[in-house]
Image (tube, rainbow, N blue to C red):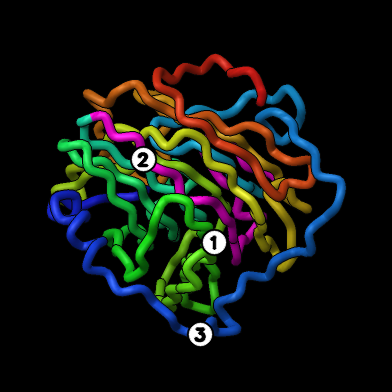
Amino acid sequence: MRRLGLALVALVVSACLAAVAGHAARPAAAVGRLAAVRSGASARFVGSMPGVEPAVSSNWGGYVALGPGSTATTASPSMTFTDVTGQWVEPKAVCSGAASSVALWVGLGGYSTDSQTLEQTGTSADCSSAGTPSYYAWYELVPANSVTISLKIFPGNVIASSVVAVGGDILVQVTDRTRGTRFTKRIAMASPDLTSAEWIAEAPAECSSNTACKQLALTDFGSVSFARTYAVGNDADGTITGPGWSATAIQLVPHAQRFYGASNQSTSGTPGAGAMPYGLTANGTGFTITWQANASTAAPTAA
């Protein structure tokens, strides 16, 4: 769950302008265990198998990797994911005079309805109520609040993100490949959720406290293609589609009953914009997710 504090929403534009780009060298431990790129990629429609319809969520859109025995509400503990990586091009926000946000991220955990933790990092494209766009990077280790990080982000930049579980710590990294800047941080976390891996476009929540959150409208981001989508599960390198695990596509539809990543969430008054994933490559190394002005559970025509 990506949570924005009320103060952060009001100040994010000035904070982004004041941020100092990071130039730290990339520690060896920060590098995700990327599997070798497999050949023969070809596009197909949503789901891990042809014709499989996506799950529906009020706040997440994208793909989740789950171990054997997982259900629609619970990620099986049969699989322990310790590394997730992904890359995308930061989209240009289309602002229409209403406050909105989209968070693009990779993460571990948070799939199960009773999950209390989620480890995630990525970028956001927000619109103020005055129609001003802003772009920034962040990480969040739920139940802790989201932290904006010191990278300048611009639309069109190539962004790579990773979350790695290292012993009792979580290592988060965001790299702006276009500008040659990087942020890396290792944070102690007592009981992380490692039962799922995600590649997500999210409609974040605006929170006045940890128990009072309201989902924001989803920023019009056009389409975003996730690439280099790798994970490590039970010490095996793989992509969205495994080996050893399965891929679940998730469509973002406002007012859907399924909410990922947190509880005590209100979606009342949420506008109808959503997002649909499609075009998962045969080898699981990428897909595209497209903004929808009036999202429904009807599947769109594959691109």
Horizontal relation, residue 159 to residue 206: left or right? right
Amino acid carrying label 1: it is Ala
Q: Gap between marks 3 and 1, in whole Å?
A: 15 Å
In the rendered image, is residue 140 in sight?
A: no
Q: Position of residue 10 (x, y in %)?
A: 14, 50
Q: Which residue is mark 2?
A: 93
What's the mark number on residue 160? Answer: 1
Q: Position of residue 213 (x, y in %)?
A: 21, 42
Relative to 124, is 192 above or below? below
Relative to 24, is 42 above or below? above
Q: Secondary structure at mark 2?
A: loop
Q: Residue at x 71, y 36 (%)?
A: 48
Amino acid carrying label 2: it is Ala
Amino acid carrying label 3: it is Ala
Q: Gap between marks 1 and 2, in whole Å?
A: 19 Å
Q: Residue at x 22, y 42 (%)?
A: 132
Q: Gap between marks 2 and 3, in whole Å?
A: 30 Å
Give whichever of discs 3 and 1 has the lower sequence position: 3
Residue 160 quadrant: bottom right
Q: Residue 110: within the magenta?
A: no
Q: Quadrant of the C terminus?
A: top right
How crowded is the residue under tag 1: few (<14 C-alpha within 10 Å), some, or many (20+)?
Answer: many
How crowded is the residue under tag 2: few (<14 C-alpha within 10 Å), some, or many (20+)?
Answer: many
Q: Nearer the viewer, mark 2 or mark 3?
A: 2
Q: Residue at x 41, y 41 (%)?
A: 202
Q: Residue 116 versus residue 281: which sits nearer the camera?
A: 281
Give the residues drawn in magenta, as a range: 68-96
